Image (cartoon, grey):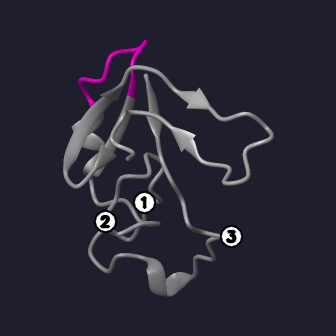
């Protein structure tokens, strides 16, 4: 499976002792890109358990969509945009 994830971070995540959970004593960093508590894990990765290996997914607004085809614009395009699931207008 492949998942389209858009990250806005422009630098590293710095973790210190204040980030540790008082009850659990640990922290979990989100690697799926779906957490509402990003960069920390909130368990959203559980929604990916039934993803199929050869399918590309896009998550947004609480929904999962299958991306049938990813089409990249020519390098001559001036907006640099990428089209994916056909929702772009």
Tags 3 and 1 touching, CB below 8 Å: no
Bounds of the magenta span?
A: 49-56
Q: Considering depth in this image, is 18 or 35 the residue closer to the camera?
A: 35
User: Mark 3 to mark 1: distance in Å?
Assistant: 15 Å
Residue farthest toward the bottom in the current orientation of the protein: 18
Q: Earlier in the sequence, mark 2 or mark 1?
A: 1
Residue at screen point 56% across, 66% down: 8
Q: Is residue 66 left or right of residue 80?
A: left
Residue 36's disc is 2
Residue 39: in magenta span: no
**Residue at the spot of label 1:** 28
Residue at image point 33% right, 41% down: 87
Viewer-side label of 2, 1: 2
- Farthest residue toward the right? 76
**Mark 3 or mark 1: whose residue is earlier in sequence:** 3
Q: Are marks 2 and 1 in contact (CB under 8 Å)?
A: no
Which one is nearer the viewer's eye here, 84 or 25? Answer: 84
Tag in front: 3 or 1: 3
Which residue was labeled with disc 3? Answer: 12
- Number of dots carrying numbers: 3
Decide: is 69 above or below 5.
above
């Amino acid at each position: 499976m492949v998942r389209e994830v858009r990250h806005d971070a422009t630098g590293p995540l710095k973790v210190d002792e204040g980030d540790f959970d008082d009850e659990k004593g640990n922290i979990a960093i989100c690697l799926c890109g779906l957490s509402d508590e990003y960069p920390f894990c909130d368990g959203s990765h559980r929604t990916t358990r039934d993803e199929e290996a050869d399918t590309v997914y896009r998550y947004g607004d609480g929904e999962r969509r299958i991306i049938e085809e990813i089409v990249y614009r020519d390098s001559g395009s001036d907006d640099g945009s990428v089209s994916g699931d056909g929702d772009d207008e």
